Image (cartoon, coloured by chain):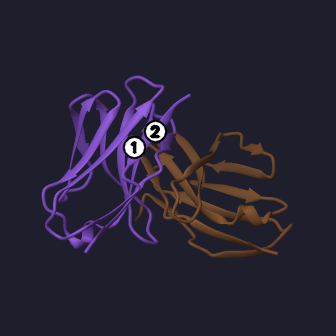
Chain colours: A brown, B purple
Amino acid sequence: RKEVEQDPGPFNVPEGATVAFNCTYSNSASQSFFWYRQDCRKEPKLLMSVYSSGNEDGRFTAQLNRASQYISLLIRDSKLSDSATYLCAVFDYKLSFGAGTTVTVRA
Amino acid sequence: SQTIHQWPATLVQPVGSPLSLECTVEGTSNPNLYWYRQAAGRGLQLLFYSVGIGQISSEVPQNLSASRPQDRQFILSSKKLLLSDSGFYLCAWGLPQETQYFGPGTRLLVL
């Protein structure tokens, strides 16, 4: 089983829609969780950290479910500029990345 | 603020040629440094990490090596490139158990 798994998508959504997707992790002792955004042919950039209580940054909401070992990312009121691949990352002794979920927002 | 530099941005090399990619970090001291490779349509694969000068840990056996001659310099090398070495090479820095920040990457094509 992979350490970190994501639905590759793509998720094709219209502007203004809400899109949500999950990332599962295998190590129950994992301590830190993050979401990154990666645009085509660019480096991943940190989108947000994921805290135990969940956190929100504008239109983006991240949540952690330790019992079921997954983190989620929800994007409200999608913009064309949200089109990207979203990578989740989980830290135990190293940072392990999922392969990414591709989101395409259409006009 | 911290910045991370990588060069070159793109590289086309013949099979069997040597490789040297450089990464430097500014604005932080004694960071953990990482080399990742991302193949087309694939996830990030951790190749090497370093917690200090001269300290290198390899995650996967491969055709590559890494060195850290200075606190904020991390070098990825190969003596003889293989076709399978093609990919997007990303350097990252981070503090222990915290998130990592990536450089702009080097896109390597081995022909």
Quadrant location, the C terminus of chain A = bottom right
- Residue in the image at 52% along x and 51% along y: A89
Label 2: how many Cα within 10 Å (few below 14, some 14–19, many 20+): some
Q: Amino acid at mark 2?
A: Ile
Labels in figure, total: 2
Q: Nearer the viewer, residue A1 or B109?
A: B109
Residue B95 picture location, percent across and down: 45, 31
Q: Nearer the viewer, residue A13 or B111?
A: B111
Q: Would residue B14 appear left or right of A6 to someone viewing this image?
A: left
Q: Which residue is mark 1?
A: A94
- Residue in the image at 24% along x and 55% along y: B60
Q: Which mark is residue B36?
A: none
Q: Amino acid at mark 1?
A: Lys
**Marks 2/1: CA–CA distance:** 20 Å
Quadrant of the rendered structure where residue A37 is?
bottom right
A75 relative to B6, above or below: below
In front of the other: label 2 or label 1? 2
Q: Secondary structure at mark 2?
A: strand
Quadrant of the rendered structure where residue A93 is?
top left
Chain letter of mark 2 equals B
Q: Which residue is mark 2?
A: B4
Residue A49 picture location, percent across and down: 62, 42
Residue B45 picture location, percent across and down: 37, 58
Label 1: how many Cα within 10 Å (few below 14, some 14–19, many 20+): some
- Residue in the image at 19% along x and 69% along y: B82
Residue A42 picture location, percent across and down: 52, 58
